[in-house]
Image: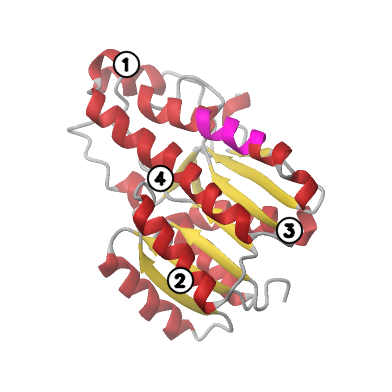
Amino acid sequence: MEFKDKVIIVTGASEGVGKATTKKLMAQGAIVYGVARRQEKLDALQKEMEAENLPGKLHTLSVDVSNTDQINNLFETIKQNENRLDALVSNAGVMDDFQPVTEISAEEFSRIININLMGNFYLFQAAIPMLEKGGSIVVTASIAGITGGKAGAAYTSSKHAVMGLVKNTAVMYASKGIRVNAVAPGGIMTPMTSEMDMEKVNQTGIAVIGNGAKIDKMMATAEEIADNLVYLISDQASNINGHILVSDAGLTEA
């Protein structure tokens, strides 16, 4: 098993892509530190993974990735328990409500930037010193970071910025054997998308976005995107660095 006894952080681990990624890594014997904001969902994840009787180990911690104190506590815990880190799967993020720039508040714009961009910044800063012997970081990005019309102003801005952070970090730390990549999904069938409150979604924004090209397969499964993330931190992707893997069934090409 490629990930046997590897120490790997997965953020946004309690549901969707993060949960699927955690399960795939544990199936290969990894020691996963699964983090998310809601403790009750982490408790449910722990019970489910124990019932699966997978060969890996799971440690869960409640962490808001936009909170530096909680990030520091996470990495201090890993230092004390493992004294090493092999990979970071930075998957946590939030959507906006498809608001154009004139229809979103500064507070909401900042909230999304703080989680989607600054959260990655804080995680990168804490993870890289622990990847002393080389390692891998992969981020769940979005095709909203490639095009201009797949989400609202805040989410689109955050994902464009995250891709810049990924590419710059990949270049800056390549000589240390650290690889940094991202997966850019289109739509994903996850609780975050299924539970969106359509009454709050900006109808002007979603109408503009909805008028784009359509293809048969509009939504990926969480497992499909998890496969992409796991691949990019694996040794099979050892020569891939600074890459944005678009995983959208051709949506951005249609």
Q: Is residue 152 visible?
A: no
Residue where numbered disc 1 is placed: 101
Image spot of residue 155 (x, y percent): 40, 30
Which amino acid is tagged 1?
A: Val
Q: Earlier in the sequence, mark 3 or mark 1?
A: 1
Image spot of residue 167 (x, y percent): 66, 34
Residue where numbered disc 2 is placed: 77
142 vs 27: above or below: above
Residue occupying image coordinates x 53% and y 32%: 143
Give yes or no for residue 132 being in the magenta stretch.
no
In the structure shown, which secondary structural element does the residue marked by tag 2 occupy? Answer: helix
Q: Earlier in the sequence, mark 4 or mark 3?
A: 4
Residue occupying image coordinates x 56% and y 26%: 146
Q: In screen coordinates, is 185 left or right of 137?
A: left
Magenta segment range?
Answer: 161-168
Q: CA distance from mark 3 to mark 2?
A: 20 Å
- Quick one: 19 or 73, which is closer to the camera? 73
Image spot of residue 87 (x, y percent): 62, 60
Q: Which mark is residue 56?
A: none
